[in-house]
Structure formats: structure tokens, C-alpha cells
Amino acid sequence: MIDFACIGGNKCGTTWLYEVVRQHPQLNVSINKEPHYFSRNYDRGNEWYRQNWKTDERPRGEFSTSYLYSDDAIRRMAEDCPDVCVIVMLRHPVDRAVSHLRHVMRSGTYDGVHHALDEHPEVVKNSQYTDRIAMLEEAFGADHVFLGFFPDLKNSPTDLIRQVFSFLDVDPAFTPEGLNDIVGKGYEPRFPILDRIRLAIYWALKERGFYSLIQLVKRTGVTKVYKRLNDHSGSGEDANQNARELLQSHRDMFRTDLQRLSQLPSVDRTEHIENWISSL
């Protein structure tokens, strides 16, 4: 099975982390970033899961963000690989939810942000961290849970990645390429239908196991060129502002959750949490 997993939160920088962690020569990271084995594909069996890695070398890990939000996934991981090291990335709850909501709206047709939020209550739910982290601590032990913070990704990526490598017990002095790259940033497509076609092709390739082909296409830079040509940044600013104002209505709930989070054993740094609380 696996030795480590970055399991979320979604829209918290896990794509960036995947791109830098997989460069470490002492780590064996799945070629498919998100196998979603323990949450969505458990019935496919262990042999299917092992095909997500090129070799059986250890330590072996993956980056499925669905696990953080799935009780079944956490239970299955605890049963199948009880000594797994778990990485969770956290972001300001409103910022995370805004990014999540904009992603939802790009992927479907909604009559404004209110409609999208009504259809996707997980946008708010996934910005409440405490109960999920507490469940991980109970399942694996607080010493097997590492919490990374989105501001460090932006402001001190070298320090963050060294902390991650130390947590995984590999050489922390290894410096990956692209530490300051912006990876997985959302954008506003000029032609949404083209973006839905692109995503349909991506998911079809992924479902059929063409992970190496997906990585090859990414390395050619075609995806970046496409997004640059189809980018209509600025067109969604009103929607972004509306989403932020709407999500601010949950600030008391977010504040209470962050206050509880700061008391958990796995939280050894609280400055970001305190800043987030004061901003709500």
C-alpha cells in the first residue's frame, strides 16, 4: 500500500505540492495525481491501485484530495496502511471557498453564485477543517499528521517543502524545480464549452489509465498555452466579489471552527490560524 498521502484540502495548493514532491529522488509518487482509491475506486482492488506507480519502491505516496472529506476513505486507509503519514494543506476558509465556488461555476451552468452555492453545499462544508483533522489524529495519531498552510506556499515555499520532506523522513536539503511557479490556478474561460470539452477529454484519458500521456501533454506546455488563449480574466470579478460577500455570511461559523482547530494536537503553528480568525 502507501506510506504517505496528501489528502487535501481542495483548492489549497495540493497540485503545487504534487509537482514539487514528486521530484524528490527518495520518494515514489503516483503518476496519476489523484487515484481516489480509498474514496471512489476501492472496489477496483489493490492490483488496480498499484498500477498508479511505475515501480514498487518505497516510500510510496499519492495526492487524492477526496480523502479528507470521506469517512470511508479515512477508515479504509487506517485499516490498510495504519502507519501512513498524512499531509493536509489549509487555506483561509473564505478564500478556499471562493476558489471552490468559481471552479464549480466553470464546470456547470448556474444562475449566479447563489444558485451554485445552493447546489453545492460542500463549498462551505469543505472550509470547516477541525472535525476532519481530529478524525485523522484519531485514526493515525497526531504525529502522523502534517498541516501545511497556503500562505507559506506563496511566501516561503522553500521552508514549507523542507518541512514536508522532513515529515516524510527524506533529505530535506533537496531543492525541487518550480518552487515559485503558480500551479493549478483557476481562470475564467473565454469559451466555457471548450473548457468542458478539454475536461471531458482529460477525465476520459484518466479513466482509461493514460496517466503518462497526461503528464507528457502537460510537460509540452500545451495546457498552459490553451489556458492563456482561452483566458478571460477579469470577466468574473463581479462574480468573485459576489461569492466573497455571500461566503462572508458564514464567517462566525468559520471563526468558531478555526478556534477549535488551533487547539488540536497536530497544530504546532497557529500564527496563520490567528490571522485568519482576526480577518473574519
Image (tube, grey):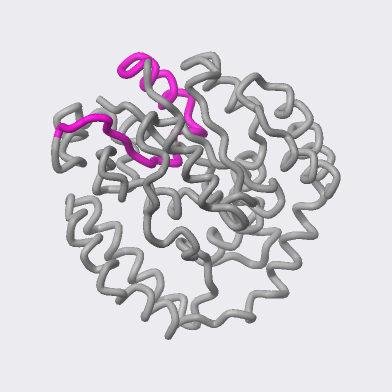
Q: Does residue 161 appear left or right of residue 264 in this picture?
A: left
Q: Is 171 covered by the magenta stretch?
A: no
Residue at (52% x, 36% y) in the render: 88
Which residue is drawn at the image coordinates 19% and 27% (left, top)?
46
**Image position, residue 105 (x, y; %):** 56, 63
Q: Position of residue 57 (x, y in %)?
A: 17, 32
Q: Decide which of 68, 57 is in the foreground and name it.
A: 57
For the N terminus, the quadrant is: top left
80 within the magenta span = yes
Residue 107 seen in this snapshot = no
Query: Bounds of the magenta span?
Result: 56-82
Whether residue 195 is situated above or below residue 209 in the rendered picture:
below
x, y percent for residue 70: 47, 30
Q: Position of residue 188 (x, y in %)?
A: 54, 74
Is residue 6 shown above or below 73?
below
Q: Is residue 120 above or below residue 222?
A: above
Viewed as shown, does residue 25 lie left or right of 276?
left
Residue 113 appears in the rendering: yes
